[in-house]
Image (cartoon, rainbow, N blue to C red):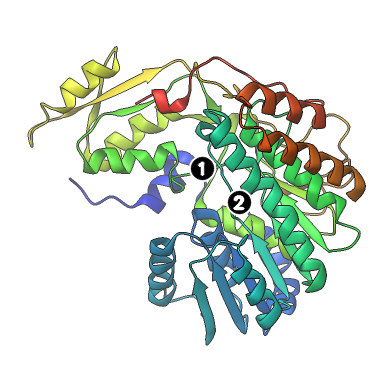
């Protein structure tokens, strides 16, 4: 196998950009970012994940005096720390502490009370996979993490208000067709309801290439285990690099005005299919040509016969047929006022509709009451969420991504 550079592959074959999409914006606003970050304190929740850790790396291009990171993934925090300490161009502050805890637990409130307030708070803790809506158990956990705990965090922050608060969203919150997107739309509703009491911003953005747990990340795992590659061949997606995801969130967090929703300025022709990326990946990773298989079983059988002399690698590409799979991506919806002039490569939604805190409380009461019912099913939760989000049109096929290779 020839040497493989993941960052170079992403740049050449996925984003097709030689430099970051946000290079101009970062240079233009460098002084503003430095003024708001240098010497300040930051708390990053969900910081061990791909986007959260990329945000931290973007943050540490500047000189914060204090950085605390919270995540339930203890191993992820360990690798994050090793990575930060090993990088030559990052300014890790003396007061750096990673905590393997849940931001919904009482011990987190102790950190806020004893170590806060923080100048910058960014929340990346989320269920992010469409596959996590397989049934009412997984949906309840998703809504709890993405929505209910987000509100709990906001209530904590009212007592210890940061100068900047950011909570990540997703492009799937625009006209959602899956529960993950709908949960993030509810999260947007929650934070916007508090945007007159806290300075809050969020961002919807594209797929992050090779992010932890993503389909592209799975290509690396499959190759190391000599297993076939599998992906839909009819789903087109926008992509940003991990580095760009962190930069986008940093710009939105620090430079955003309260209640604004950011997104990357990407053009339709920049969309890629997962199957086309898979073919490029095989050629660059191991100089393989794809061996197209008609079924999962055929692909598994072909993978079992791989040898050192193999020149063709088994792939199984298929038409998408699982619940909640949106055939296209969008970052804003009809009626949302978008400013394309303030930044070079960022659009900003400025008038996103927002509910009152009282309306949010009613919504939460209904959700909690439904979750107390031991006989609820997926359809009941989807129906209630549709009451809160009029443009939520759930795509239900009866098949989950967990039924796919």
CB under 8 Å between discs 2 and 1: yes
Return the x and y of residue 113 as percentages of the image width and height. 70, 78
Return the x and y of residue 194 as percentages of the image width and height. 85, 56
Quarter of the figure with residue 288: top left
At x 81%, y 44%, the residue is: 189
Real-space Cα distance between discs 2 and 1?
A: 9 Å
Within 10 Å of disc 2 (Cα), the crowding (few <14, some 14-19, many 20+) is: many
Q: Which mark is residue 21?
A: 2
At x 50%, y 42%, the residue is: 16
- Which is more toward the observer, 259 or 138? 138
Residue matched to label 1:
15
Side (left or right) of 391 relative to 207: right
- Which is more toward the observer, 319 or 396? 396
Name above or below for residue 198 compared with residue 186.
below
Tag 2 secondary structure: loop
Can residue 392 be seen from the camera position used here? no
Quarter of the figure with residue 405: top left
- Which is more toward the observer, 339 or 367? 367
Side (left or right) of 167 relative to 199: left
Return the x and y of residue 250 as percentages of the image width and height. 66, 62
- Which is more toward the observer, 372 or 290? 372
Return the x and y of residue 36 as percentages of the image width and height. 74, 76
Can residue 111 be seen from the camera position used here? yes
């Amino acid at each position: 196998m020839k040497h493989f550079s993941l960052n170079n592959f992403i740049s050449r074959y996925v984003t097709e950009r030689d430099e970051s999409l946000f290079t101009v914006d970062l240079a233009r606003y460098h002084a503003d970012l430095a003024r708001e970050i240098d010497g300040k304190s930051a708390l990053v929740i969900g910081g061990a994940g791909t986007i959260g850790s990329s945000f931290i790396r973007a943050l540490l291009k500047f000189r914060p005096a204090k950085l605390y990171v919270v995540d339930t993934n203890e191993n992820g925090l360990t690798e994050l720390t090793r990575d930060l300490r090993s990088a030559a161009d990052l300014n890790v502050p003396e007061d750096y502490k990673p905590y393997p805890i849940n931001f919904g637990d009482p011990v987190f409130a102790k950190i806020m009370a004893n170590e806060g307030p923080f100048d910058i708070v960014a929340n990346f803790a989320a269920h992010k996979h469409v596959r996590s809506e397989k049934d009412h158990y997984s949906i309840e956990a998703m809504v709890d993490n993405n929505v209910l705990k987000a509100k709990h965090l906001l209530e904590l922050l009212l007592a210890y208000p940061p100068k900047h608060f950011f909570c990540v969203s997703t492009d799937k919150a625009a006209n959602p067709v899956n529960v993950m997107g709908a949960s993030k739309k509810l999260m947007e509703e929650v934070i916007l309801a508090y945007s007159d009491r806290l300075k809050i911003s969020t961002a919807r953005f594209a797929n992050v290439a090779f992010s932890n747990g993503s389909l592209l990340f799975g290509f690396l795992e499959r190759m190391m285990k000599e297993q076939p590659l599998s992906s839909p061949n009819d789903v087109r997606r926008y992509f940003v690099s991990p580095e760009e995801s962190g930069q986008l969130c940093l710009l939105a967090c620090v430079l955003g005005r309260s209640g604004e929703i950011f997104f990357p300025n990407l053009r339709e022709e920049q969309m890629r299919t997962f199957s086309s990326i898979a073919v490029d990946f095989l050629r660059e990773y191991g100089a393989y040509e794809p061996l197209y298989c008609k079924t999962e079983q055929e692909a598994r059988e072909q993978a079992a016969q791989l040898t050192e002399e193999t020149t063709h690698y088994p792939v199984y590409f298929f038409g998408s047929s699982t619940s909640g799979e949106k055939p296209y991506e969008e970052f804003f919806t009809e009626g949302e006022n978008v400013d394309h002039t303030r930044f070079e490569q960022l659009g900003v939604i400025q008038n996103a509709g927002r509910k009152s805190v009282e309306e949010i409380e009613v919504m939460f009461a209904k959700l909690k009451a439904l979750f107390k019912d031991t006989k609820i099913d997926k359809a009941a939760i989807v129906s209630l969420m549709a009451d809160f989000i009029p443009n939520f049109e759930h795509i239900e096929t009866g098949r989950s991504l967990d039924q796919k290779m």
